[in-house]
Every structure is written in C-alpha cells, then in structure tokens.
Amino acid sequence: MKKLFKCSVCNFVCEGETAPAVCPKCGQPHEKFNELPTESADKVYASERTNDIHMEIISLIDKVIALSHEGINLNLDPACVGTFTKAINEGYIVKQRSKAEIENHITKGKW
Ligand SMILES: [Zn+2]
C-alpha cells in the first residue's frame, strides 16, 4: 500500500512515495501536503470501492428518473403513469440515501 498525501489547502488526496511537487487541484507547492497517518489512509482505501458504488447507483437512478419522466409524458394509461411516478419517488429516496452515506464517509475521513 502506497502512502497517501493530503493537500492542506484544498484537501486533494494523492497516492505515491512522496507528495507531488505541485497540487494537481490548487497548484500549491508540495510543502502544503501532509502524509495521512496509516489509520486515515486505511479508511480511504477501505471506502474507495464503496464510494464508487454509491456514485454509480446515483448515476443509474438519474437514468431511472429520466426514463420515468419520458414514460409519464407518453401517458399510455393511469397505471403506467403511476408506476413511473413511483419509480421517480423511490428513485429520489435511493439517490438521497447514497448521497447521505457519501457525506457520512467524507465527514469520517473515508474518502
Ligand atoms: Zn491543493
């Protein structure tokens, strides 16, 4: 496992043997980077895939919501419109749950 360094100005985290010469996000010099302690780095690595899954779920739900709006606009019959409406409402719940979990990960250093 490589070391992780965090920019103290913009919170950009990068992996390597040393901090980068310049922050890729804010352009500050490498002196602005601090190496994350092992416990913090472990949290970042452990949550990496989970965070990606949450973001993919959010993206997929956006597609579900867009398709459901299209279905509502086609207005085939009330039951069909009702099904699409439920998909939108439930989609927002799924999406917001994943967003809340991402926020929790960020505040706990799992990002
Ligand atoms: Zn930076």
Image (cartoon, helix red, strand yellow):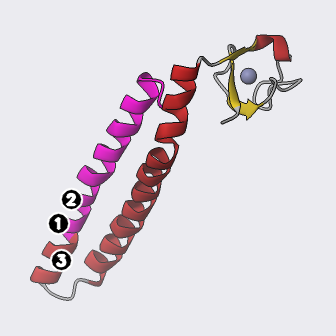
Which quarter of the figure has residue 68?
bottom left
Residue placed most toward the observer, 38 or 109: 38
Question: Mark 1 highlights which residue?
Answer: 86
Disc 1 crowd rating (10 Å Cα; few below 14, some 14-19, many 20+) is some
- In the image, taking residue 14 as reference, residue 104 lies left or right, namely left
Instruction: Find out whether the residues at labels 1 and 2 contact each other: C-beta distance under 8 Å.
Output: yes
Q: Residue at x 77, y 24 (%)?
A: 26
Q: Earlier in the sequence, mark 1 or mark 3?
A: 3
- In the image, taking residue 111 as reference, residue 25 lies left or right, namely right
The percent position of residue 96, horizontal first and vertical second, equals 31, 45
- Marker disc for residue 90: 2
- Marker disc for residue 81: 3
Which quarter of the figure has residue 34?
top right
Rendering quadrant holding ligand 1 = top right
Frontmost of labels 1 and 3 is: 1
Q: Residue furthest right?
A: 21
The residues bearing labels 3 and 2 have C-alpha atoms spaced at a distance of 14 Å
Dominant secondary-structure state across the stretch colored magenta: helix
- On whether residue 58 falls in the magenta region, the answer is no
For label 3, the SS is helix
- In the image, taking residue 49 as reference, residue 103 lies left or right, namely left
